[in-house]
Image (cartoon, grey):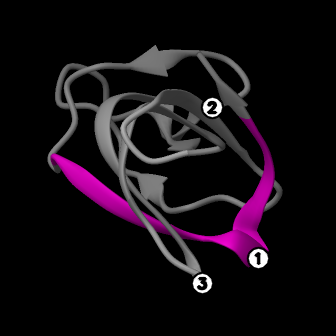
Amino acid sequence: MKDQNADVFLNTPLLVLGPREESRSKSKTENILRVTGKIVEESAAGVVVAVKSVGSEKEIEKNIPFEKVFIPFHKVDSIILG
């Protein structure tokens, strides 16, 4: 899987992004359930993804505060390579 582009779908949220600056509404708080990017490392415990975007069930967010994230396999529902 290393060095491949991937969409990683999670069975539980990775983290919660807070309300956006332009809208303090709690309805804008979303759970990250999808991570899109390139797999840069893999181990028996999980994968490290260089993140291009993250998403919830409703929307995709490209302006994110981190470049890489470790995703443990116990949180992964499926990985689509390509």
Q: Nearer the viewer, residue 80 or 3?
A: 3
Residue 56 badge: 2
**Which three-letter amino acid code belongs to the residue tagged 1?**
His
Q: The N terminus appears in which quarter of the rendering?
A: top right
The residue mark sitting in front, 2 or 1, is 1
Residue appearing at x 17%, y 50% in the figure: 66
Between disc 3 and disc 2, whose residue precedes?
A: 3
Q: Residue furthest bottom?
A: 45
Between disc 3 and disc 1, whose residue precedes?
A: 3
* CA–CA distance in space, label 3 to label 1: 8 Å
**Which three-letter amino acid code belongs to the residue tagged 2?**
Ser
Query: Marks 1 and 3: in contact by CB < 8 Å?
Result: no
Q: Which residues are magenta?
A: 67-79
Report the residue marked by disc 3.
45
Q: Callout 1: few (<14), some (14-19), or many (20+) C-alpha neighbours within 10 Å?
A: few
Q: Position of residue 68 (x, y in %)?
A: 24, 53
Between disc 2 and disc 1, whose residue precedes?
A: 2
Residue 63 badge: none
Taking the image as shown, residue 54 lies to the left or right of residue 73, namely: left
**Which three-letter amino acid code belongs to the residue tagged 3?**
Ala
* CA–CA distance in space, label 3 to label 2: 24 Å
Magenta region's main secondary structure? strand
Taking the image as shown, residue 79 lies to the left or right of residue 25, namely: right
Q: How many marks?
A: 3
Report the residue marked by disc 1.
74
Q: Position of residue 27 (x, y in %)?
A: 58, 32
Q: Secondary structure at mark 3?
A: loop
